[in-house]
Amino acid sequence: MPGPILSVGSTVTCPHGGHMGVVPGSPRVAVSGMAVATMADAFPVAGCVFAVGTKAQPCVTVEWLVPAARVRVMGQPVLTQASVGICQGVELIPQGSPSVLSTQTRVIAT
């Protein structure tokens, strides 16, 4: 499904309000002056407050499962607003899907 390409400047949150960052592995390609997000990048989550009872279970990373089908950067598929991912806690327990709140709108990938 086509959608705007995610970049370092995109705003993505976990289901509990934590904010996802993008640690680009290859910042050679940029959109709107910011590095493009690819499957090879790291996606840490900060500020998640999720807990089960008294045990903290915050989201710490996002694992992207469905990237763009046709667009690649340095051989890696890019991520788009339509990409599917799963937020995970420290124990790699799935915690829900991330929400893309904002991204650049100039470049669309399929």
Image (cartoon, helix red, strand yellow):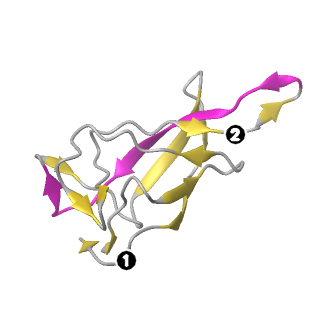
Dominant secondary-structure state across the stretch colored magenta: strand
Locate residue 10, reporting x and y percent.
46, 60
Task: Report whether 109 appears left or right of 58.
Answer: left
Is 17 above or below relative to 33?
above
Q: Nearer the viewer, residue 80 or 104?
A: 104
Residue type indicated by callout 1: Thr
- For the C terminus, the quadrant is bottom left
| Residue located 72% across and 48% down the image | 16
Q: Which residue appears farthest toward the front when viewing the image?
A: 33
Determine which residue is flagged by label 2.
Answer: 48
Instruction: State which quadrant residue 48 falls in.
Output: top right
Give the image quarter of residue 24.
top left
Is label 2 in a helix, a strand or a loop? loop
Image coordinates for residue 47, horizontal then vertical, percent = 68, 39
Quadrant location of the N terminus in the rendered image? bottom left
Q: Position of residue 102 (x, y in %)?
A: 51, 68
Q: Please give the residue where the numbered disc 1 appears in the rendered image.
A: 105
Frontmost residue, 19 versus 2: 19
Q: Is residue 58 left or right of residue 56?
A: left
The reply, left or right, for residue 11 in relation to residue 66 is right
Residue beneath the point at 76% across and 37% down: 50
Q: Residues within 10 Å of mark 1 (few under 14, many from 20)?
A: few
Given this view, does label 2 or label 1 mark the residue nearer the observer?
A: 1
Three-letter amino acid code of the residue under disc 2: Cys
- State how far apart marks 2 and 1 are (Cα): 27 Å
Residue at image coords 36%, 57%? 7
Q: Which residues are magenta?
A: 54-73
Pick the residue in front: 13 or 34: 34
- Residue 67 in magenta stretch: yes
Q: Is residue 57 magenta?
A: yes
Instruction: Identify whether 5 is placed above or below 53.
Output: below
The secondary element bearing badge 1 is classed as loop
